[in-house]
């Protein structure tokens, strides 16, 4: 009996030995076939990125101001520039509250007032307006002035032409048949634009920054109407100023203005999560092409400072 027990125990131990040996051989094979590799320490550690951001130099308005002044030099005598980051407290201005003849920049408050009226149900975009001889504004930009009297347009078409082609006759038709200059001025006053005069065509960078911020924040109209208005301001026929030198994937909602000795462009730049207002007003300009080229360069300088660096 005792001998039987001993044999049984030996067999059990031998079986256990075989099982353990099998596992050992399998593990050794796997280790050689698929060696364990320890990852080296990465050159950059993503977890440290937020910490690194803390040590990046803060954007300095004075630094950007000096860069812009150096770039302008003595080219312009009378100008206004305002840059305002919508996602931070960064703001840089040069003569930002100076009042200028607005030229076509004042089409922005006209369109904004129109869209706030539409929000209230007071504007029918499908309404048809018939062009009369006395309506034709035979100067500046736009194609309607070449159309014969009796030509008809929907309100939506006039809005598009006023925004995209800066059509002066289209703006005149909107401001006289759909929403009067007095109503536009009432809206302007209510918005807090104390330096904007619709009748006398005056405005400032500070007022336009305020208005664009209201539009972008949806404080003028609902989301659908806001996107429609911004869409018209984005697809402009005049892309030679603020947008000209910016990357192709940059979104620019803007409005140009060109008058006697005045070359303007104001709007909002979107790049990724970055969003900022930039406005450039000039007066007493004698060489239009050089001014347009310099405005494009200044816009690129601002973009590089706020977005790239």
Image (spheres, rainbow, N blue to C red):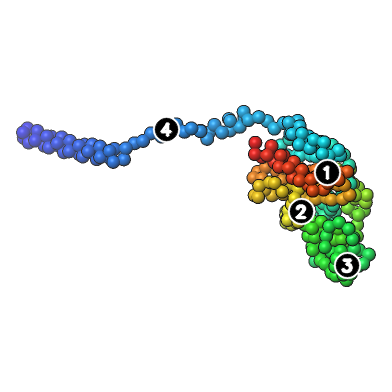
Residue pointed to by mark 4: 40
Residue visible at 77% across and 57% down?
A: 164
Label 2's element?
A: loop
For marks 1 and 2 on the same chain, the one whose residue lies earlier in the sequence: 2
- Residue at 58%, 30% in the rendered image: 51
**Neighbourhood count class around disc 4 (C-alpha, 10 Å): few under 14, some 14–19, many 20 upward:** few
Query: Badge 2 local density, few (<14 within 10 Å), some, or many (20+)?
Result: some
Would residue 2 be found to the left or right of residue 265 on screen? left
Q: Nearer the viewer, mark 1 or mark 4?
A: 1
Which one is closest to the eye, mark 3 or mark 2? 2
Real-space CA distance between mark 1 and mark 4, rounded to the nearest whole angstrom: 56 Å
Name the side, left or right, on which 110 lies relative to 28: right
Q: Which numbered circle lies on residue 131?
A: 3
Mark 3 to mark 4 CA distance (whole Å): 75 Å
Q: Which residue is mark 1?
A: 281
Cα distance between the residues tagged 2 and 4: 53 Å
Distance CA(mark 1)–CA(mark 3): 32 Å
Helix, strand or loop at mark 1: strand
**Residue in the foreground of this view, choosing between 172 and 247:** 247
Residue 114 drawn at (x, y percent)? 83, 56
Q: Earlier in the sequence, mark 1 or mark 3?
A: 3
How far from the left and from the top, in percent, is residue 270? 69, 46
What mark, if any, has residue 238 been given in the picture? 2
What is the secondary structure assignment of the residue under circle 4? loop
Q: Earlier in the sequence, mark 1 or mark 4?
A: 4
Label 3's element? loop
The residue drawn where x is 74% and y is 52% is 239
Position above or below: 230 against 16: below
Depth order, front residue of 235/29: 235
């Amino acid at each position: 009996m005792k001998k039987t027990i001993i044999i049984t125990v030996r067999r059990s131990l031998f079986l256990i030995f075989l099982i353990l040996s099998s596992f050992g051989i399998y593990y050794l094979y796997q280790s050689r076939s698929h060696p364990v590799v320890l990852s080296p320490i990465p050159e950059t550690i993503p977890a440290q990125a937020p910490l690194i951001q803390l040590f990046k130099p803060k954007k300095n308005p004075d630094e950007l101001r000096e860069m812009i002044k150096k770039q302008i030099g003595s080219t312009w005598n009378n100008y206004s520039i305002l840059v305002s980051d919508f996602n931070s407290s960064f703001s840089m201005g040069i003569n930002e509250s100076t009042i200028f003849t607005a030229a076509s920049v004042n089409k922005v408050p006209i369109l904004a007032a129109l869209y706030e009226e539409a929000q209230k149900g007071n504007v029918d975009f499908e309404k048809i307006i018939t062009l009369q001889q006395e309506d034709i504004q035979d100067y500046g930009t736009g194609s309607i002035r070449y159309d014969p009297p009796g030509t008809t347009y929907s309100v939506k078409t006039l809005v598009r032409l006023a925004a995209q082609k800066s059509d002066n006759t289209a703006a005149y038709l909107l401001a006289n048949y759909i929403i009067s200059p007095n109503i536009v001025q009432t809206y302007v006053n209510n918005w807090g634009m104390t330096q904007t005069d619709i009748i006398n065509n005056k405005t400032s960078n500070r007022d336009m920054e305020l208005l664009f911020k209201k539009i972008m924040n949806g404080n003028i109209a609902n989301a659908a109407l806001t996107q429609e208005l911004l869409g018209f301001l984005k697809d402009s026929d005049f892309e030679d100023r603020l947008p000209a030198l910016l990357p192709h994937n940059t979104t620019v909602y803007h409005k140009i203005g060109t008058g006697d000795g005045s070359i303007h462009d104001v709007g909002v730049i979107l790049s990724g999560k970055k969003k900022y207002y930039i406005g450039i007003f000039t007066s007493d300009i004698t060489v239009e092409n050089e001014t347009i080229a310099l405005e494009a360069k200044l816009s690129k300088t601002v973009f590089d400072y706020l977005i790239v660096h």
